[in-house]
DNA sequence: TTGTTATATCGTAATATTGCAATATAATAA
DNA sequence: TTATTATATTGCAATATTACGATATAACAA
């Protein structure tokens, strides 16, 4: 074995797990951090900022894009990546709901 | 290669990535979900609820415990797991900060 | 057209994760 | 003591992730 038994869990549970997996690597956290510091939605100098090779960065960007954390728009030769506020809000809301439910707990 | 280059990133970035990794599997999402539905902090009938063998569940619980999402207290033979509100609040706060910074962005 | 620049994909090696049977541990019961 | 019950750990096979060199693609410039 070794394959995760995704089929045994609900669609919602798999969706949340996929969202978190997209943020489960420091390089992808660093990409989100960087996108927050730049005013204009800068594209591939992310490669220069990160201590990783260009194909590796491209792969991490792809995962963030697949999870809808970032969007990329083509601008000539370059691609302009930026954060997607909806996904950020979705996770924030998820944890807000959890914290509400926790208020009625013992422990 | 294949090992994540954690040393090249900041402590904070690694810490956040570790938190999210703990939630990056549907089984661990399901455990959190379940802990939210039970009034008393039930222990090992998590094994009966999940479609996984007892050692696998124990392993997932360990990862949630290492990331401080849950705590376990011994009650006789059983162990009583429950959620840790502090870690929940920490992530929620993290996304709140991100959303604040996003307000000043273009895209 | 050719050249250049920016990004993506392929192929592959190193490492990490997932899942479970078997076994160990630890607390209680008889 | 032995038995039982609850949870953890070990060992290993299957699979997934990470990283990067080499290469492909796509847009623009000359």
Image (tube, coloured by chain):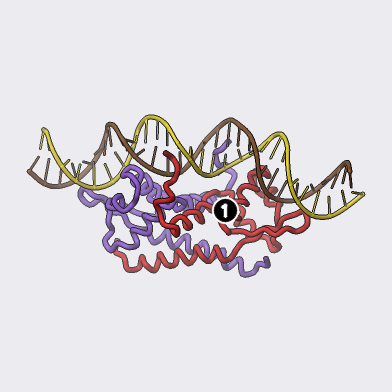
Chain colours: A red, B purple, C brown, D yellow
Residue C15 image offset from top left, x and y in percent: 52, 36
Residue B72 image offset from top left, x and y in percent: 31, 52
The residue positioned 64% from the left and 56% from the top of the image is: A34
Q: Quadrant of residue B85?
A: bottom left
Query: Of residues B5 and B50, which is closer to you in this image?
Result: B50
Q: Which residue is mark 1?
A: A29
Chain containing mark 1: A
The residue positioned 43% from the left and 52% from the top of the image is: B26
Mark 1: which secondary structure? helix
The quarter of the image holding the N terminus of chain B is: top right
Taking the image as drawn, is residue B73 in sight? Answer: no
Query: Of residues B50 and A21, which is closer to you in this image?
Result: B50
Position of B83 with respect to A84 (left or right) is left
- Mark 1: give few (<14), some (14-19) or many (20+) Cα within 10 Å: many
Residue B104 image offset from top left, x and y in percent: 64, 69
Query: Of residues B12 and B105, which is closer to you in this image?
Result: B105
The quarter of the image holding the C terminus of chain B is: bottom right
Q: Quadrant of residue B34?
A: bottom left
Instruction: Give the tally of numbered discs.
Output: 1
Query: Of residues B102 and A55, which is closer to you in this image?
Result: A55
Say above or below: A88 vs B61.
below
Residue B75 image offset from top left, x and y in percent: 22, 52
The residue positioned 40% from the left and 54% from the top of the image is: A9
């Amino acid at each position: 074995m070794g394959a995760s038994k995704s089929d045994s869990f609900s669609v919602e549970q798999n969706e949340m797990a996929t969202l978190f997996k997209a943020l489960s690597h420091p390089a992808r956290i660093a990409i989100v951090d960087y996108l927050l510091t730049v005013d204009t939605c800068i594209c591939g100098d992310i490669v220069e900022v990160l201590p990783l090779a260009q194909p590796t960065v491209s792969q991490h960007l792809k995962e963030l894009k697949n999870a809808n954390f970032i969007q990329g728009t083509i601008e000539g030769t370059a691609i302009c990546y930026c954060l997607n506020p909806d996904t950020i809000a979705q996770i924030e809301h998820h944890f807000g709901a959890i914290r509400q439910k926790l208020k009625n707990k013992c422990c």
